[in-house]
Image (cartoon, grey):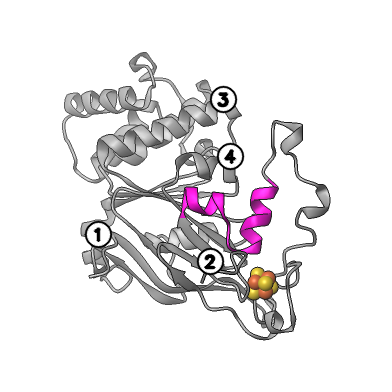
Amino acid sequence: MSGYLLEGKDLTKEFPAGKNKTVHAVSKVSLGLVEGETLGLVGESGCGKSTLGRMMIRALKPTSGEVFFRSRPLTAMSGKEFAAVRRSFQMIFQDPYASLDPRMTVRDLIAEPLETHHICSGKKEITERVLELMDAVGVPGDFLYRYPHQFSGGQRQRIGIARAVAQDPEVIVCDEPVSALDVSVQNQILNLLSDLKRKRTLTYLFISHDLSVVRHISDRVCVMFLGKICESGPTGEVWAAPAHPYTSFLLRAVPKADPKERTDASLLLTGEIPSPIDPPTGCRFHTRCPFAVKQCAEEEPPLRTRGERTVACHFPLDRNGT
Ligand code: SF4
């Protein structure tokens, strides 16, 4: 027994890219979610976060590797076995508008998962449940028969969240759920997600490129670079003392309101992210890392563990550490 509610082991996803080329989107990544926690998954766009998140709930088939849910092999389940646990998993997307059918009213949008999973039946009972869910996510019941285009972006995300929690899932993969929203609305949605997690004992895998957002909501954080996890640990500890140079540079790049706290631009990360079609040998970060030495280009650093922290670097920033 691993102690994880949901655990991915050695997950790899490759996509064909034409002319005998392959995109190495995720490469041998292992990831575990503890029941009731929010695990933040951060990294730049294209690093494989969303692909990994989708594999974790079997929304995408891995090229290799396995996922376990309550120690049962999710990836190896037959279609019938998976159908019995499918409602335990949900996703919340960046663009709620794209995931809401514009021809359906809010009532029908939220009723859909209730009907699909036979959670309740009968028009009256379903409408009552829809109203409860609207109340839980802060959408006024008066708006029951409105259409998605009649709502603001924040309200549409609330409707998307109501749809996600309607089927009482255990795990929700939140894929950049506030990236398209104004900062003030972002905070409201993050507070709503935290509130729902507490009340409904949910477990979140929270994917974002925005470190401030991840800091706000996550208990633990995993940092990804080019299809690999380079560091993980309790959010506060990683923020206070990042051990991987990439994490350190991501944190320096977070915009600061106080000019005195702003980072010298010369200390920020430069260069393009290497291509996942032809990832660098050794440490995948070595082409951008200011601390890289010959060994870094030749040997892949193993993911080493110390307490609750893991780091994949030959020379972690805490030289007295791992
Ligand atoms: Fe930098 Fe080398 Fe560590 Fe990679 S292994 S992060 S290149 S110091």
Question: Real-space Cα distance between discs 4 and 1?
Answer: 31 Å
Report whether the residue tagged 2 is closer than 8 Å to ligand 1. no
Q: Are circles 1 and 2 on residues that touch, CB within 8 Å? A: no
The residue sitting at 47% across, 76% down in the picture is: 63
Q: Which residue is mark 2?
A: 229
Front one among 123 and 317: 317
Report whether the residue tagged 3 is closer than 8 Å to ligand 1. no
* Circle 2 SS class: strand
Q: Which residues are magenta?
A: 234-253
The residue sitting at 28% across, 23% down in the picture is: 131
**Disc 1 versus disc 3: nearer the observer:** 3
Question: Vertical placement of 154 versus 51: above or below?
Answer: above
Q: Is residue 266 magenta?
A: no
Question: Real-space Cα distance between discs 1 and 2?
Answer: 30 Å
Q: Which residue is mark 1?
A: 83
Q: Which residue is mark 3?
A: 184
Q: Amino acid at mark 3?
A: Ser
Pointer 3 or 4: first along the chain? 4
**Disc 4 versus disc 1: nearer the observer:** 4
Pointer 1 or 3: first along the chain? 1
* Circle 3 SS class: helix
Question: Vertical placement of 24 versus 115: above or below?
Answer: below
User: Within the displayed image, which quadrant is ligand 1 positioned in?
Assistant: bottom right
Q: Position of residue 317 (x, y in %)?
A: 62, 64
Q: Residues within 10 Å of mark 1 (few under 14, many from 20)?
A: few
Residue 276 visible from this viewpoint: no
* Labelled disc at residue 179: 4
